[in-house]
Amino acid sequence: MKTLILSCAAWLCASVAAGQEPSDALFISGQIDFARAAGGGTGSVEWLHETARGGVQFGVLSGSRGDAWWTYGRVGGFLRRRPAILSGTIEAGGGAQPAARFQYRRLDGQVSVPLPAGHTVFETEGQVAQMAADTRSVVRLGIRSLLSPALTASGSYYLVAFNGSVAPALSARIDIERKPTSLLAGFALARRQRPPALLESVVAVSLNSVEVFAGCGFGRTSYRAQVIVNLSPPPGDANRVVVSVRIPLKRQAQPPVSDR
């Protein structure tokens, strides 16, 4: 799910920066996991409604890995309160493995604040995810900077806690936007942990090994498609491909401006 969230986050950030009139869009995504232990995949459909002041998001996600499957819902939104942007997400659902069922819950919150110097944004995020008896918490501090109209660089520092053990992680990413195409590339460095493969698959940020990712997007109008490939060294538990499509829905008509 990590690259899926990265993909949707890129579109959401672009919408936050540029969207001025009410609009709606569907995000349809599919992910294929290539893991040595057990492969799998995930699919999702999400609806985003955005206005000049903020937006709301609803979605359903379902996936499987090995002999386990899960389904959960997502509710989220963001609010512009100058100079900050506040956002949050709640996920809840469950699934089953042979002879056992489990519940899944995740809570995520983020604050983005522009810095005085240039086109730079400071971001802080907290996340808690729980599946069966396992719990993972993530705290992130990040910087995102618009280096030119076409180039954005970002980096983050994480503290990842899993069942009481804490480990740091780092990530960096570059985005190049030249319509109608876009490119992205980055990496994540983390002290290797071995959480259950199922929790690693479902939770939005895995961050348990060295990973590199790259992708491209294309689209001439509000329709956008994006493909991201994520690779990790052996045993390769984070090898995956994500395809996402943004489909714009009908924009709401703006009320006429009075001459008075």
Image (cartoon, rainbow, N blue to C red):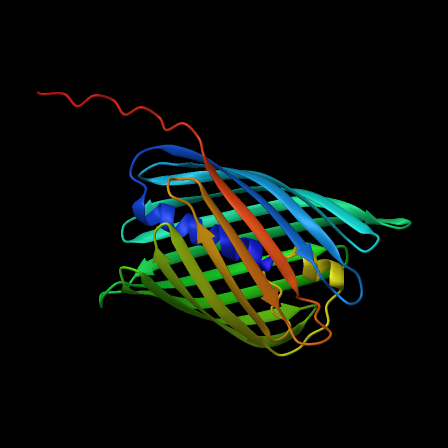
The quadrant in which the N terminus is found is: bottom right
Q: Is residue 225 above or below residue 173?
A: above
Q: Is residue 74 above or below residue 233?
A: above
Q: What residue is at 35 percent from the left and 36 percent from the top?
A: 51
Q: How many marks?
A: 0
Say whether residue 259 is left or right of residue 101: left
Residue toward you, 182 or 56: 182
Q: Position of residue 238 (x, y in %)?
A: 66, 66
Q: Residue furthest bottom?
A: 191
Say whether residue 21 is left or right of residue 217: left
Residue toward you, 63 or 175: 175
Q: Position of residue 143 (x, y in %)?
A: 38, 67
Q: Residue furthest right?
A: 99
Q: What residue is at 36 percent from the left and 51 percent from the top?
A: 85
Q: Position of residue 35 (x, y in %)?
A: 74, 64
Q: What residue is at 50 percent from the left and 51 percent from the top?
A: 226
Q: Is residue 63 above or below residue 175?
A: above
Say whether residue 164 is left or right of residue 183: right
The quadrant in which the C terminus is found is: top left
Q: Position of residue 257 (x, y in %)?
A: 17, 23
Q: What residue is at 74 percent from the left and 54 percent from the top?
A: 40
